[in-house]
Image (tube, coloured by chain):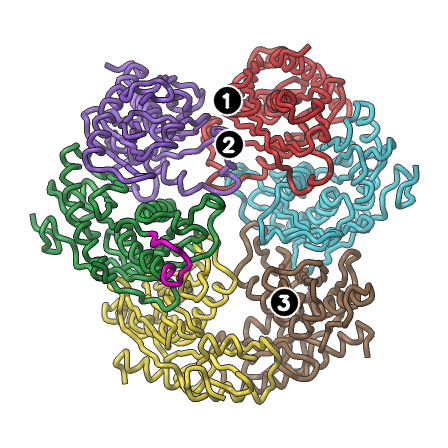
Chain colours: A green, B purple, C red, D cyan, E brown, F yellow
C-alpha cells in the first residue's frame, strides 16, 4: 500500500514549530504538521477559576477554534452559531493533556489559557494543538519563572500527541485528511516523554478493531510522539 | 484493597434491564446498574438527516440528559443554560456506539432516536446509556420489522459498554461514583459480541498509565461486556 | 356519556404516590395519576434569591420539564432549544401553588427547589406536579426540622391540584389526554385542605363557558382535591 | 375603604380608545386605561403557521412587549436577554382571548398578528392589551372585508378583559398598580358581549380565596366588561 | 427636481418635541420629525459601568429599539431573535453623540440611560433619536441638579443630528424614507451648537461621491442642525 | 510632534500583501500593515442570499473576527458569547466597501464571502481588512473568470481604506494602536482608484472637530489610499 503523500507507514509529516510569532502573548507557537497549521498562544492571568480557589493550585485550560476557510468547504463561523459539540470535546481534551505535563501547585494563583486556532486544516488538528500548545505553555512558564512570579518551574514532563489509524488494513502514523476520511479506525494518543499514556481516544468509524490492532497503533504512536518531543526540545532549545 | 461496595475487582454491579417501561416509545429500556438508573427510549421517525438523504441508508442518533437531582449536588437544568460540552461529548459517543451494531442500509428512510435520560447517577452513566440504549434500539428494530416497514432486521451484532479504572494501583471493573472520583485512570470501552472494540476512551486524571495497564483494563472490560451482553439477550428473550 | 376510561364523571384516575424514590434528594415523590407519571425532587439550598435576602423569609421555587418521549409524538429536548413559554408558565404556577402552603418566614435562609420531571404524560401533568411536588416539599421540610436547621415546621396547610373540564356538555373530573383534547373548557384548580382556592386557570378552547358552568367545575374540583389530600396524608403517614 | 384613586369599588378607570394612530398597520388602537397606555397594531399576513395549513382556517396571534421605562423602575430590554416567562404567558393569553371572538374559517389563508406594546404601565397591562388589541383586530378584519380579500366578516362577538381583586377585604374592579401590589387576590377575566367567560386567571398572592369571593369578583368583572365593550363599539362606530 | 414631500432641498420636515410624556422617567421627550416618531426616556441610575468605576466620572449610554409595526412591513421583534447588528450600531452612535455634549466628571457616580424607541419610522430614526434623546438627557440633568445630587450642571453644549443625501444629483436635507431608498449617498451628521462635528457617517449605496459633494452635504447639515437646536431650546425653555 | 514610530505625518506603515497563503480558498491575502496582520480568504458559493434571488445579481459579503490573543489583553472568544456590536458594525462596513468595487450583475448566481480574521492587532484592523479583503476578492473573481463560470470580469475599480486622525493637534495618516488611543478624532476612509469616497466614518472621541479639519484628514487619506492601491496592483501583478 502506498500512502497518498508517499510517506512510510511509520513516518510523520514534515513538522515545523515557529516560536513566539505573536508579539503580545506570554508564549506562542505556530505549529505546521504538513498542511495543518495551528497558531497556539498562551495567556497568563492572575486569577483562577472558582473551583481551584484556595486549593493551593493554579490552572491550565485551552480553547480551540477554526477559521471559516481552514477547510476545503467553508464552515460557518462559531461566533454566529455557538461552539459545536466537536469544538468543546476537542478543547476539553487539549486542556486535560496540557495539565498532565505540569505541577499545578507550582502555578498557584495563576491560570494559563492556551488558545489553539486552526489557520489551515489537513487532518490531525487536535493532536497538533496539543503538541504546539504544549510549547506555548512551556514558554509561558519560562516567562513566569523569569519574572519571578513563581518559584518552581511547573513543567514536569514533555507532552505531545499524534493520531494513528488503520487504512486499508495497514496501521499508519499521523493521518492526513484524505487518509483520515478513509480510515476504518482513527485513534488519538497523548503521551509523555517517558512513554506513559495520558489519553487515548479510539473510534471505529467503519468496522471494529481488535485488541492486537490497538497494540499496533500504540507502538506507532510511541515512535511518533518521541520524535515530536525531540522537535519540541529543539525548538525550545532545551537539551 | 477492598472496594467500597465489597465487590471483587472483576465484578459488575447488579444490573437490571426493564423492557418497555414507556407506553409510547417504539422501544424502551430502564437500565439499573447499581444506583445508576437510565431511562432509554427509542423513537422511530420516517425522515432522515440531510447528510444521509439519498444515500440508501437510514440513521441512528442519541441524545443524553440528566435530571437536575440525579446527582448528590443538584445541577442546573440544561434547558436553562444549553447543553454542556460534556453532554454533547457523551451523546456523540452513544450515537457512534449504537450505529456500530446496525446495518444502516437496512434502515433506509428511517431515523431512530435514542433518548437516554439519567434519573439517578452513581458513576458510569454513559456506558449504562450505551448498554440500555442498545436494548431500546433492538426493540425499535423489532417493531419496524414486525410492522413490515423494513425488509431486513438491521442489528448485526450486540453492543454494550463498561468503564474500568485503576484505583489505588488495582485495575477494577465497572466503577461507581466513589471509585471514579478516586481513580487515577478512567477508561470507557464499547465492544461487540465478538470481542471487537468500537470505541475506547482512556483518560489519566491523576498520573499517566502504561501500555500494560491499558491491556489489563481491556481484559477486564471484555469480561464485563460479555456478561452485559448476556443480560441484554435474556431481557430481549433472544438466544 | 361514557368516559373513554369508563370512569364516573366525578371519579379521579388511580393515584399512586411513591415516597423518596431518589437517593440524593432531601425529599422526593414519584406521582402516578393513571398514565401520567411525574418524578418530583426537593433540593434544599442554604442561600436564597436576591429578592428575599434580608427579608426574614426563605423561598420555594419549582422547575418543570418533560422527557422527550413522555408524549405520543416525541418533542424536542428543551436543552437544545431553550424553555418554551408553556414550560415557564407551568413552573411559575407550581411555584406559586407550593408557596401558598408554607410559612416562608419559617424557612429563613433556605431555598427549596422542587424539580418536576414528567416521565410519561397523559394529561394533567401540571396538576400532578403540584400534588406530587407538595409531598416532596413536605418531606424536605421534615428533613430540615429533624436536622434542627429550622425551628418551626413551615407547612401551614396541605395543597393539591386537579383539572376539570366540560366534555360533550358534561362536567368531568381529572381529564386524561384524550378527554383534554376534546374538552370545550379546561380548568385547573389548586386548593388547600380547608377548601380555599389558591389558583384557578380556566380556558375555553372551543366555545365559551357560563358562570354556572364554572361553579359546577369548582364543585367537582373540591371533591377531587379532598381525595388527593387524603392520599398525600396516607403516603406521608400523617393523620 | 377608600381607593387610592378615589374610585368606587365597581368603577373603571377613565378609558380612552384612539383609533388608527399608526399609519402603516392594517388596524391599530392606542388604549389608555388611566395611566396604563398600550399601543396595539394589527398586521395582516397572507401566510399561516404550519399547524393551520390546509385546515381551511386562518390564524390570529399576539405578541406583547413593554418599553424599558414603562415602569417606575426601568426594566432591561428583552431584546438583550430574551422574552421572559411572564411575557410569553401574557402573549399566549392575549392570543387565545382574541381568537375566541372570531370565526377562524372566515380568515382562511390569513394570519393576523396583534402587537401590544406597553408605553406606560400602571397595572392591568394584559387586560388592556386584550381590550385594545381586539379593536385593532376588528379594524384589520374590516380592512380585509373591504378589500374583498375575505368573503365573510370574521368577528363573531366582542371580547374585552378586566382585572378584579380583593383589597383589604373588599372586592374592587380594575386594579391600578398600587392596588395590585396590595391585593390579596388578583384575577383576570376575559369575557364576550354575551356574558360568557373565555378565560379566568385567579391567583392568591397573599392568602387564599373562597368560592363566594370568586363569584363576587366575577360579578364585578361582568359589569366592567360590559362597559368596556360599549366603549369599543363607540370607538369603532358600530351600534 | 421636486421632493416627494414638496419640501425645498434645504428644508427640514415639521419637527415637534413633546416634553415629559412619560410619568416615570427622570426626563423624556417624544420627538416627531414628520412621520418619524421616537419616544426617548432618560433613566438615572446611581451605579456606573465597571470601566468608569473610580475614574471620577459618570456615564451616559443609549439603547435603541423599534416597535414591530413601526415600518411598512412588520419586522420581527428583537426580543425573539436578539439585537441586530444595525440596532447595536445605532445605539452605539447615539451614546457617543450624547456623551459629547456633557462633562462626564459632573456626573460622577451616576449613569444616565437614554432609551430611544421608534413608534413609527419614516427615515432618519437614528438622527431623530440623537436630537430627541439629547432633550431627555438635558431634562434628567436638570432633575439631578435640582435634587442636589450633583453640583455642576453637566451639559456643556447642545447636540443634534440630521441626515443629508444626494437624490437624483441634488444634495437635500433631512431625507424621509422614500428619498432615503433612492439616494445615491446617505450621510448622518451629529454636530454641536458651535458648528463642530462630533460624528459623520457617509455611505455611498449606489455610486461613490466626491470631496466637493461631501462639503455640500456638510453645509446643508449645519443649517439643519442649527434649526434643530433652536427647537430643542424652545422646548426646554432655555435662552 | 514626533510619532511614536518615527513616521512622517503623511507616512503609511510598512505594508506587505502576501498572495494566496491559504491552499483551499478561491482567493486569499495575508495583509500586514506594521504589526496589524489580517488573513483574508474569499469563498465562492454558487447560491445567493434570499434578497438577491431573481434580481440578475450576485452578492459579496464579509465576516470579521479577531483571535483571542490578537490584542495586548486577551479578549473572550466570540464563539462563546456571540458577535459583539463592534464586530457586526465592522463586517457590515467591509461588505459595503467591497461591493462598491464590483458590478454585482457580472456575479449573477454567485456569492463571494470574504473572511477577515485578525491574527494580530495594532490599530486599523477594519481598514486593513478592506484593503486585504479586496485583494482576495479580486483573486476570486479571476478564478471565476478563468474557470469560465462568469462572462465579464466583475471588478470595476480598485478599493482600499485607511484611517486618519488628529493627534496632539496634528493630522496624521494610518494610526497605530498607541496613536489611536490618544487621538482626539479618528476617521476611516474607503476610497476608489479614481479618488471617490465610498464610505467615511468620523468620530470625535475627545473634543469635536471642525469642517476644515475634516478636509485635512481627507487629503491625507487620499494620498495614503493611492499608495495602498499601488501596492494592491503590484501584488496582483496588474498594470
Task: Kindly indicate whether the residues beneath marks 1 and 2 are on one polypeptide chain.
Answer: no
Q: Around disc 1, counting alpha carbons within 10 Å, would you say few (fewer than 14), some (14 to 19), or many (20 or more)?
A: many
Identify which residue is drawn at 66% across, 12% down. Answer: C238
Tell me, yes or no, whether the two marked residues, 3 and 2, touch with CB atoms within 8 Å: no
The chain containing the residue under callout 3 comes to E
- A20 or B236: nearer the eye? A20
Task: Kindly indicate whether the residues beneath marks 3 and 1 are on one polypeptide chain.
Answer: no
Identify which residue is drawn at 45% across, 52% down. Answer: A109
Camera-nearest label, 3 or 1: 3
- E192 or F55: nearer the eye? E192
Question: Which of the 4 image quadrants contains residue F204?
Answer: bottom right
Camera-nearest label, 1 or 2: 2
Query: Residue E151: x and y, percent?
Result: 78, 70
Residue A119, above or below F238? above
Q: Secondary structure at mark 2?
A: loop
Question: Which of the 4 image quadrants contains residue D25?
Answer: bottom right
The chain containing the residue under callout 2 comes to B
The answer to whether residue C114 shows anywhere in this view is yes
Q: Can you identify the residue that label 1 sits on?
A: C22
Mark sitting on residue E55: 3
Which segment did they paint magenta? A143-154
Real-space CA distance between mark 1 and mark 2, rounded to the nearest whole angstrom: 13 Å
Q: Residue furthest front?
A: A151
Q: Is residue F231 left or right of residue C124?
A: left
- B179 or C155: nearer the eye? B179
Camera-nearest label, 3 or 2: 3
Q: Can you identify the residue that label 2 sits on?
A: B73
Amino acid at each position: 500500500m502506498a500512502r497518498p503523500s508517499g510517506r512510510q507507514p511509520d513516518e510523520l509529516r514534515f513538522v515545523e514549530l515557529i516560536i513566539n510569532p505573536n508579539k503580545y502573548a506570554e508564549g506562542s507557537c505556530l505549529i505546521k504538521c504538513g498542511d495543518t497549521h495551528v497558531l497556539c498562544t498562551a495567556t497568563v492571568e492572575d486569577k483562577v477559576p472558582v473551583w481551584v480557589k484556595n486549593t493551593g493550585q493554579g490552572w491550565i485550560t485551552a480553547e480551540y477554534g477554526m477559521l471559516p476557510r481552514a477547510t476545503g468547504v467553508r464552515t460557518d463561523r462559531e461566533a454566529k452559531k455557538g461552539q459545536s459539540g466537536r469544538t468543546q470535546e476537542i478543547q476539553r481534551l487539549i486542556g486535560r493533556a496540557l495539565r498532565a505535563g505540569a505541577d499545578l501547585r507550582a502555578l498557584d494563583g495563576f491560570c494559563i489559557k492556551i488558545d489553539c486556532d486552526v489557520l489551515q486544516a489537513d487532518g490531525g488538528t487536535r493532536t497538533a494543538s496539543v503538541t504546539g500548545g504544549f510549547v506555548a505553555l512551556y514558554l509561558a512558564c519560562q516567562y513566569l519563572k523569569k519574572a519571578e512570579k513563581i518559584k518552581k518551574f511547573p513543567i514536569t514532563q514533555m507532552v505531545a500527541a499524534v493520531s494513528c489509524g488503520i487504512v486499508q488494513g495497514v496501521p499508519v502514523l499521523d493521518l492526513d485528511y484524505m487518509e483520515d476520511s478513509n480510515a476504518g479506525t482513527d485513534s488519538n494518543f497523548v503521551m509523555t516523554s517517558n512513554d506513559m499514556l495520558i489519553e487515548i481516544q479510539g473510534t471505529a468509524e467503519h468496522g471494529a478493531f481488535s485488541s492486537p490492532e490497538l497494540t499496533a497503533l500504540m507502538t506507532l504512536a510511541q515512535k511518533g510522539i518521541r520524535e515530536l518531543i525531540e522537535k519540541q526540545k529543539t525548538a525550545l532549545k532545551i537539551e
